[in-house]
């Protein structure tokens, strides 16, 4: 029995986790400096989250593109979202203005990929190779 992972659902989950991290973490963890812990402005953690979203998202979207629909739209929308996430790291005064459209673009790319994959009628038929 093979374990099947729904990469689009996993990609959406990591995107939402990233959005929660970016929006809620500063509110919940503002007391950590009192204890000598500083992760709110941890640049390494921020880049790790962006890298995680990029790797998982790319795997999910590439699978859908390659095996199901051959439409580049979700990949382009996803790339825009990752670009906006990286841009928010450099333009700190505009972080929220880049974060919201970035998350919307990434989630929309996964949702569109999911739709296109389901529209492909060959999925998991006898001739399906995965």
Image: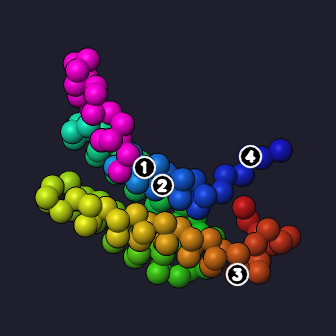
Question: Which residue has dot 3 on it?
Answer: 119
Q: Quadrant of residue 124?
A: bottom right
Assign the C terminus to one quadrant of the image.
bottom right
- The local secondary structure at tag 3 comes to helix
Q: Position of residue 115 (x, y in %)?
A: 64, 76
> Which of 129 and 82 lies nearest the eye of the viewer?
82
What's the distance in space between the residues labelled 2 and 3, CA to CA? 25 Å
> Which of 128 and 82 lies nearest the eye of the viewer?
82
Highlighted magenta segment, given as a residue range: 23-39
Assign the N terminus to one quadrant of the image.
top right
Residue 16's disc number = 2
Of tags 2 and 3, which is closer to the observer? 2
Residue 73's disc number = none
Of tags 1 and 4, which is closer to the observer? 1
**52 displayed left or right of 64:** left
The question of residue 33 being in magenta is answered with yes
Residue occupying image coordinates x 72% and y 51%? 4
**Label 4–label 2 contact, CB within 8 A:** no
Residue occupying image coordinates x 42% and y 49%? 20
Question: Which residue has dot 4 on it?
Answer: 3
67 versus 85 height, above or below: below
Question: Which residue has dot 1 on it?
Answer: 20
8 versus 25 height, above or below: below
């Amino acid at each position: 029995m093979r374990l099947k992972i729904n990469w689009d659902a996993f990609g959406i989950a990591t995107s939402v986790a990233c959005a929660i991290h970016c929006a809620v973490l500063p509110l919940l963890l503002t007391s950590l400096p009192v204890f000598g812990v500083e992760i709110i402005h941890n640049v390494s953690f921020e880049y790790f989250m962006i890298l995680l979203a990029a790797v998982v998202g790319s795997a999910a979207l590439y699978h859908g593109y390659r095996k199901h629909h051959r439409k580049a739209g979700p990949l382009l929308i996803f790339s825009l979202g990752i670009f906006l996430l990286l841009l928010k790291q450099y333009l700190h005064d505009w972080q929220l203005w880049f974060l919201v459209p970035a998350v919307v673009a990434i989630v929309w790319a996964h949702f569109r990929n999911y739709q296109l994959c389901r529209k492909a009628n060959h999925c998991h038929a006898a001739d399906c190779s995965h």
